[in-house]
């Protein structure tokens, strides 16, 4: 009987750590996915431009913001250069057993397609 009284709390603690640890890992994976997809949305919104064309930074930021709004995640979209967008996303979840809040922040960068009009000639 003593063995059961000692091991039961230890086993319950182990299960809690495994389940809540999985929630924390999933939170980080979601943040990474959302950041990458928002950066991709910015690239798709701008699309390829002919050589010497300009990139519509507002369209890129609006597309990434719209994607983030659809996921419910919070984040910032920054045009970091003439052809680069960086998206930083913050996702929070609550541990299903402990109720502890887990937050993950991830950043993804996408290169906008500028100056691409045809493939290489053989």
Image (cartoon, rainbow, N blue to C red):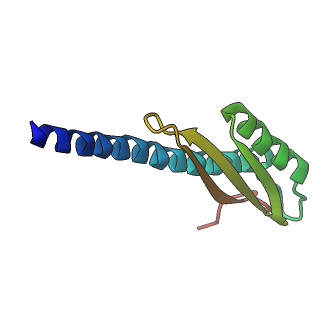
Image label count:
0
Left or right, 11 with respect to 23, comes to left
- Name the residue located 84 percent from the left edge and 42 percent from the top edge: 62
| Nearer the observer, 100 or 107 | 100
Residue 104 appears at what percent x and percent y? Answer: 59, 52
Left or right, 118 with respect to 18, comes to right
- Name the residue located 21 percent from the left edge and 39 percent from the top edge: 8
| Nearer the observer, 78 or 4 | 4
Say if 84 sits above or below 46 in the image.
below
Q: Is residue 72 visible?
A: yes
Residue 116 appears at what percent x and percent y? Answer: 75, 60
- Name the residue located 82 percent from the left edge and 48 percent from the top edge: 60
Instruction: Give the position of the C terminus as an image quadrant.
Output: bottom right
| Nearer the observer, 56 or 103 | 103
Left or right, 84 with respect to 52, comes to left
Direction front: furthest residue = 2
- Name the residue located 68 percent from the left edge and 50 percent from the top edge: 89
Residue 21 appears at what percent x and percent y? Answer: 41, 48
Residue 112 appears at what percent x and percent y? Answer: 75, 58
Residue 68: quadrant of the picture: top right
Q: Is residue 112 visible?
A: no
Instruction: Give the position of the N terminus as an image quadrant.
Output: top left
């Amino acid at each position: 009987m003593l063995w059961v009284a000692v091991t039961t709390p230890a086993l319950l603690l182990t299960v809690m750590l495994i389940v809540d640890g999985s929630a924390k890992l999933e939170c980080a994976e979601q943040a990474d996915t959302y950041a990458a997809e928002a950066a991709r949305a910015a690239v798709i919104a701008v699309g390829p431009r002919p050589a010497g064309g300009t990139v519509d930074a507002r369209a890129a930021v609006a597309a990434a913001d719209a994607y983030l709004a659809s996921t419910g995640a919070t984040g910032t979209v920054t045009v970091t250069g003439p052809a680069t967008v960086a998206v930083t996303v913050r996702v929070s979840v609550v541990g299903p057993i402990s109720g502890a809040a887990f937050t993950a922040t991830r950043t993804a960068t996408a290169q906008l397609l500028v100056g691409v009009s045809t493939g290489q000639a053989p």
